[in-house]
C-alpha cells in the first residue's frame, strides 16, 4: 500500500539513505528500527513529502506521489516533540486538519469527541495544551494526526521523553488504538521493546 523504492538522500558529501526500500501493507503496523543517525526520520520526511529525495520513488496505493506536495498526500505525521499549536485548545488542535479540509463545524466537533475518547482524553476539548502533561500532549498529537483519516500514519519516535512506566502504558494504548482504527502505520523507533509491543513487523535500517 505504501512503498518506497531506492530512496537516496545526500546532505552535502554525506549519503544518509542509499537506495533504501520499504513496503507497508494495507492495515499493517511496521516499526522502523535502527540507531540514531541512520536515516530513519529522514525516510519518514521523504514519505511525508517534507523532504525531496535525491533519487527514488514513493508510491501510495500504486500511485507515484514522489513529487506530490505533503498536504495532498493524505499521509499523517506524528512528530517526536508533538508540535502542538500553543494558541489553540485541545479541540482546536485535534480539529485543525479537518478545518483545513473545510469540514463542517458539527462534523469536526463530533470527530474531535470521538478521537479524544479513543485516546483517553474525553472532556479535554476546552483545555489549553500548555497545561497538559507529557503523556496527554502525545495523545493529543496522535488524535490530531488521525482526525483527517489519513491513508497512512507516520510516527517519529512518538513516545520519546516519557518515564518508563508511562512509556510502556502508552505503547500498549497506541498498539490498541492503531488496530481499533485499522490504521496503516510506520513507526520510527530505536527501542526494540517498543517495536515489539506496537508493530506487526520490524524493519531494521543499518548504515552501509
Image (cartoon, rainbow, N blue to C red):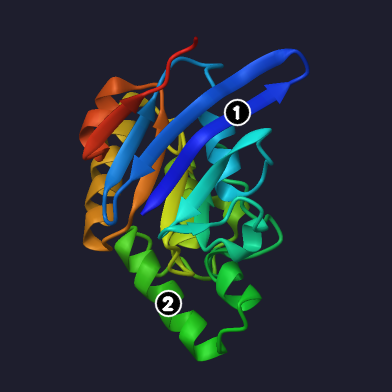
**Disc 1 target residue:** 8
Quarter the N terminus occupies: bottom left
Q: Is residue 161 visible?
A: no
Residue 15 at x, y percent in the picture: 64, 17
Q: Circle 2 sits in a helix, a strand or a loop, which is it?
A: helix
Q: Is residue 105 visible?
A: yes
* Mark 1 crowdedness (10 Å alpha carbons): few <14, some 14-19, many ≥20: many
Q: Circle 1 sits in a helix, a strand or a loop, which is it?
A: strand
Q: Is 28 rendered above or below residue 182?
A: above
Residue in the foreground of this view, choosing between 84 and 37 = 37
Q: Is 49 rendered above or below residue 194?
A: below
Number of callouts: 2
**Disc 2 target residue:** 111
Q: Residue at x 42, y 56 (%)?
A: 152
Q: Residue at x 52, y 65 (%)?
A: 94
Residue 202 at x, y percent in the picture: 28, 30
Residue 9 at x, y percent in the picture: 64, 27
Residue 196 — which label?
Answer: none
Q: Say which label, 1 or 2, has the lower sequence index.
A: 1
Q: Is 66 rendered above or below residue 54?
A: below
Q: Residue at x 48, y 56 (%)?
A: 140
Amino acid at each position: 500500500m505504501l512503498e518506497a523504492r531506492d530512496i537516496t538522500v545526500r546532505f552535502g558529501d554525506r549519503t544518509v539513505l542509499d537506495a533504501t526500500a520499504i513496503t507497508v501493507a494495507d492495515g499493517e503496523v511496521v516499526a522502523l528500527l535502527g540507531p540514531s543517525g541512520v536515516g530513519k526520520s529522514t525516510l519518514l520526511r521523504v514519505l511525508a513529502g517534507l523532504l525531496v529525495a535525491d533519487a527514488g520513488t514513493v508510491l501510495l496505493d500504486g500511485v507515484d506521489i514522489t513529487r506530490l506536495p505533503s498536504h495532498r498526500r493524505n499521509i499523517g505525521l506524528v512528530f517526536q516533540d508533538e508540535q502542538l499549536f500553543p494558541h489553540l485548545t485541545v479541540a482546536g488542535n485535534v480539529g485543525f486538519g479537518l478545518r483545513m479540509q473545510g469540514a463542517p463545524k458539527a462534523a469536526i466537533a463530533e470527530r474531535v469527541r470521538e478521537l479524544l475518547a479513543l485516546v483517553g482524553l474525553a472532556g479535554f476539548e476546552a483545555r489549553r495544551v500548555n497545561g497538559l502533561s507529557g503523556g496527554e500532549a502525545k495523545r493529543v498529537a496522535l488524535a490530531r494526526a488521525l482526525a483527517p483519516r489519513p491513508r497512512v500514519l507516520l510516527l517519529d519516535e512518538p513516545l520519546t521523553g516519557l518515564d518508563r512506566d508511562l512509556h510502556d502504558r502508552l505503547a500498549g494504548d497506541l498498539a490498541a488504538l492503531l488496530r481499533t482504527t485499522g490504521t496503516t502505520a510506520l513507526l520510527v523507533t530505536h527501542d526494540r521493546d517498543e517495536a515489539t509491543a506496537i508493530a506487526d513487523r520490524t524493519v531494521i535500517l543499518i548504515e552501509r
